[in-house]
Image (tube, rainbow, N blue to C red):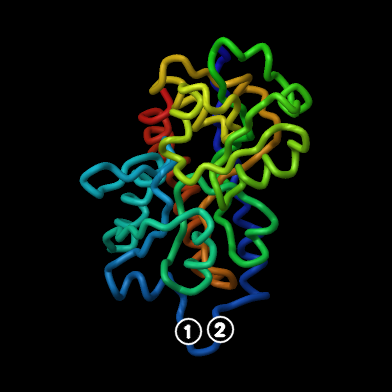
């Protein structure tokens, strides 16, 4: 079984955020989320809630995971309570852009397409695309080329970077869109699919939860990736606060304690 990757937090580019402050601001008449969250005492959080170990909705309706733990501390720093809204991956960016939430979390990959409509926090994790397969097939699916065969059944969940990766890289494999990220791993175990490509942290988590599944070289992902929180575009004051909070959480050890809880 492959060794998990070193999830080292990235250095935060706070100086770049400060430079942005002179170039953009919330639209006229609309205050920063930094102010409105403190006044309302509520931080509205959009999350798909189907992505262990980042954000997962339990049977009782509550949420748990890396981002959930971090949101607890972040909300408290604003004197606010976290209020979660479960949305699909396809609706995550539209809901944020429409102003229905203050922040979107839950294992969100940083992409230029998303950045066209939203800000991202400074990335807090390097977490590239990694296949997860039945353990007996690890040697068979080592590369994109090895996976992209007419006999390979590639499965993916809709609306996010996993779907984009599958459609962009697998032209010969048999592609299947599966609507529920929570049950997609059961399709592999039941031999109804062969490969699911997701972030290495999720692949490692699921191989622990589901004996018989193995992450393929999670320390050497198929594609480089970063993760961060998605924020309303042009709200520079809020982004600066988010980045500063992440920086202090990393420097003070809170961030690493959360990571250790979920990844060790």
Q: Residue furthest left?
A: 60
The residue at the point 39 percent across, 74 percent down is: 35
Quarter of the rendering occupied by the N terminus: top right
Along the horizontal axis of the image, is 87 left or right of 228?
A: left
Residue denoted by label 2: 27
- Residue 79 lies in quadrant: bottom left
Image position of 230 with respect to 158: above or below: below
Image position of 227 with respect to 92: above or below: above
The residue at the point 68 percent across, 34 percent down is: 174
Q: Which of the two residues, 241 or 60, is positioned nearer the viewer here?
A: 60
Q: Which of the two residues, 202 or 254, is positioned nearer the viewer here?
A: 202
Q: Secondary structure at mark 1?
A: loop
Quarter of the rendering occupied by the C terminus: top left
The residue at the point 78 percent across, 26 percent down is: 145
Q: Which mark is residue 30?
A: 1
Q: What percent of the width, then of the height, locates residue 153?
A: 63, 29
- Pointer 1 with pointer 2, Cβ within 8 A: yes
Q: Secondary structure at mark 2?
A: loop
Q: Residue furthest bottom?
A: 29
Q: What percent of the width, then of the height, locates residue 180?
A: 45, 43
Along the horizontal axis of the image, is 250 left or right of 72?
A: right
């Amino acid at each position: 079984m492959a060794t998990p990757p070193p999830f080292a937090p990235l250095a935060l580019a706070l100086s770049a955020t400060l430079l942005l402050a002179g170039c953009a601001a919330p639209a006229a008449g609309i205050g920063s989320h930094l102010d409105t969250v403190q006044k309302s005492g509520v931080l509205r959080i959009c999350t798909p809630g189907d992505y262990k170990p980042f954000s997962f909705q339990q049977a009782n309706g509550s949420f748990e995971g890396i981002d959930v733990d971090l949101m607890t501390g972040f909300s408290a720093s604003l004197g606010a309570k976290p209020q979660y809204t479960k949305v699909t991956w396809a609706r995550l960016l539209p809901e944020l852009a429409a102003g229905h939430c203050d922040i979107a979390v839950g294992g969100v990959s940083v992409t230029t397409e998303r950045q066209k409509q939203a800000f991202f926090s400074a990335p807090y994790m390097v977490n590239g695309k990694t296949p997860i397969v039945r353990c007996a097939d690890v040697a068979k699916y080592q590369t994109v080329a090895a996976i992209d065969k007419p006999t390979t059944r590639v499965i993916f969940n809709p609306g996010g970077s996993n779907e984009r990766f599958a459609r962009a890289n697998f032209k010969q494999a048999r592609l299947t869109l599966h609507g529920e990220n929570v049950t997609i791993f059961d399709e592999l175990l039941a031999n109804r699919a062969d490969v699911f490509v997701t972030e290495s942290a999720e692949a490692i988590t699921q191989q622990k939860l589901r004996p018989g599944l193995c992450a393929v070289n999670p320390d050497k992902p198929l594609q480089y990736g970063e993760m961060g929180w998605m924020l309303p575009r042009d709200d520079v004051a809020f982004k600066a606060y988010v980045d500063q909070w992440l920086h202090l959480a990393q420097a003070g050890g809170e961030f690493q304690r959360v990571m250790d809880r979920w990844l060790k």
